[in-house]
Image (cartoon, coloured by chain):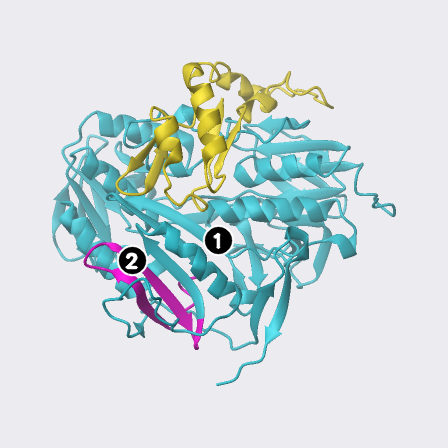
């Protein structure tokens, strides 16, 4: 699981900090810092945090890199020799 | 839907640039029903990742650079050509040339090649061990590793947002840091004199050795390793690390000879993200989004804006992708009000509008003294920008004022007594010659129903 927070939207309500304190923290009064790669045991907390965000600023998804793997997504994927970098991201999820 | 000609929902689309804008455009194309072949080219070997954490969490050692990936909104059925640079564009044959020799034919092309860190101009000095830049994931990993090793002093050259965030991370790690800035204050280029002076005090209060009004005239090394730097005021700094934070260079060189209006300031495009050619004629098959784009914004007198903002990359990519697969009347303008954020020295700084598009500024809420405030910027009597420090919740209101071309200075709110309600010159250095055009307000807030109206200027 990978997350990104739209910090233009974020207004520092800090609901996420209460619901997933190991992933989100306030740095100072209202600057949000977070761990973009979410370890497995935090997935549920992060889902709740994303749902509770008053301004819906948290995007939760699989790493975009998965789609970049040569085997990814099927499609007209002629995996050229240079297109295999996605493999480097394997294992992000669930750590 | 889109029935005629190229058809829109089939065919070949190539996106050059595999960062935030490229990724969001690819997702939007598929979400809008594009069913043809989609190729995304990126010169870095990494899949799309998020840059803002690189100068914050990553430098603080809380997050590994390799973990700064981006989530996808949904699976993108695309061919990813990563680690390969685009080397040219043939607009007649409609194909992108890659450095590995491959040619990628397209019906529609999106240019989202972004920027790179401006390198230190003296290449022999730039090669010294310890001279770094910060733009990419690999840059951040390198710098974080150097900071882990406990350098005796870090020299940051340039006090824009990136330089200031690097200095902040260094101080938070307890490292000695010198910041050398040619201008009169940090952040002054983006935020003007009032907040620049505030930022200078902030840095010094956090133990930064801040030197303004100086340039670094030489980087010194011994045995291939950086040992320090000479400043234009005759002083000398001993440092193990120098981070060159002199802004960004737009990645447009590959477009030389393409006939597009592409140069050091970016690729010019219209409000619908269609690229202009060098004659100012709009193309219909080449689109631009993200940091590399220059586009006219009605709210700012149609000046061509180049925005190195996360939010602009997302919004512009979505508009570009929509327009790439939509027939003329269904195309949308990119009218998003610019916005960005920075966190440094424990403060959260957020901006809406274009602070440099201003002649005056007023602290409308809060105060510089308590470090919680909203500074509102005006140009010829209307609100054009607002910047909050640790008061993000107040900022939304000002976005509305900017969009509606509200009068400047804004009337004082009931909630707060500003310390100084008198506007002062915004002191944006090197002010651009602002053209005097019609004042425009945005109206209609459904994404596909955003319109602009011309406001009659009275008094």
The residue pinned by badge 2 equals B373
Q: Residue furthest front?
A: B414
Q: Is residue B187 left or right of residue A49?
A: left
Chain appearing in yellow on the rendered image: A
Give the image location of residue A89, x and y in percent: 49, 19
Question: Is B371 colored magenta in this rendering?
Answer: yes
Quarter of the view holding residue B106: top right
The residue pinned by badge 1 equals B307
Looking at the image, residue B150 lies above or below residue B395: above
Question: Is B344 colored magenta in this rendering?
Answer: no
**Distance of label 2 from label 1 (alpha carbons):** 24 Å
Mark 2, secondary structure of its residue: strand
Tell me, what hue is chain B?
cyan
Could you tell me what secondary structure mostly forms the magenta stretch?
Answer: strand
Image mark 1: chain: B
- Asked whether residue B289 is in view, the answer is no
Give the image location of residue A56, x and y in percent: 50, 39
Mark 1, secondary structure of its residue: loop
Give the image location of residue B241, x and y in percent: 22, 36
């Amino acid at each position: 699981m990978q997350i990104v927070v739209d910090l233009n939207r974020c207004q520092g309500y800090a609901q996420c900090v209460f619901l997933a304190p190991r992933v989100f923290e306030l740095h100072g009064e209202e600057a949000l810092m977070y761990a973009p790669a979410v370890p497995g045991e935090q997935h549920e907390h992060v889902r709740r945090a994303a749902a509770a965000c008053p301004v819906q600023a948290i995007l939760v998804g699989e790493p975009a890199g998965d789609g970049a793997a040569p085997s990814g997504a099927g499609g007209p994927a002629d995996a050229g020799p240079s297109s295999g970098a996605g493999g480097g991201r394997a294992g992000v999820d669930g750590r | 839907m889109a029935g005629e000609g190229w058809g829109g929902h089939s065919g070949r689309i190539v996106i050059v640039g595999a960062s935030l804008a490229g990724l969001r455009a690819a997702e939007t194309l598929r979400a809008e029903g594009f069913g043809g072949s989609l190729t995304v080219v990126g010169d870095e070997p990494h899949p799309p990742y998020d840059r803002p954490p690189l100068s914050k969490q990553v430098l603080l050692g809380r997050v590994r650079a390799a973990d700064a990936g981006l989530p996808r909104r949904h699976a993108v059925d695309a061919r990813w050509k990563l680690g390969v640079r685009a080397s040219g564009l043939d607009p007649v044959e409609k194909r992108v040339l890659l450095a590995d020799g491959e040619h990628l034919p397209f019906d529609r092309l999106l240019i989202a090649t972004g920027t790179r860190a401006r390198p230190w101009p003296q290449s022999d000095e730039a090669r010294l061990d310890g001279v770094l830049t910060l733009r990419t994931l690999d840059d951040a990993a390198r710098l974080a590793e150097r900071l882990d090793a406990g350098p005796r002093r870090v020299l940051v050259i340039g006090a824009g947002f990136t330089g200031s965030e690097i200095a902040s991370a260094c101080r938070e790690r307890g490292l000695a840091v010198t910041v050398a800035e040619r201008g009169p204050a940090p952040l002054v280029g983006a935020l003007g004199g009032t907040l620049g002076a505030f930022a200078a005090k902030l840095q010094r209060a956090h133990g930064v050795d801040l030197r303004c009004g100086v340039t670094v005239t030489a980087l010194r090394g011994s045995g291939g390793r950086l040992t320090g730097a000479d400043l234009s005021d005759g002083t000398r700094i001993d440092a193990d690390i120098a981070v060159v934070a002199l802004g960004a260079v737009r990645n447009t060189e590959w477009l030389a000879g393409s006939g597009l209006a592409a140069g050091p300031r970016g690729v010019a495009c219209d409000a619908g993200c269609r690229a202009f050619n060098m004659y100012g004629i709009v193309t219909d098959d080449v689109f631009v989004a993200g940091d590399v784009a220059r586009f006219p914004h009605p709210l700012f007198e149609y000046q061509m804006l180049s925005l190195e903002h996360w939010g602009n990359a997302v919004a512009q990519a979505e508009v570009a992708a929509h327009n790439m697969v939509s027939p003329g009347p269904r195309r949308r303008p990119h009218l998003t009000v610019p916005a960005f954020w920075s966190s440094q020295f424990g403060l959260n700084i957020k901006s809406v509008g274009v602070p440099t598009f201003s002649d005056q500024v007023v602290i409308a809420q809060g105060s510089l003294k308590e470090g919680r405030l909203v500074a509102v910027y005006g140009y010829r009597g209307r609100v054009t920008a607002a910047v909050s420090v640790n008061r993000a919740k107040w900022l939304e209101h000002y976005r509305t004022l900017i969009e509606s071309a509200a009068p400047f200075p804004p009337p004082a709110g009931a909630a707060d007594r500003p310390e100084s309600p008198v506007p002062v010159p915004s002191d944006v250095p090197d002010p651009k010659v602002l053209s005097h055009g019609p004042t425009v307000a945005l109206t209609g807030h459904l994404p596909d129903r955003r319109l602009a109206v011309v406001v009659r200027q009275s008094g």
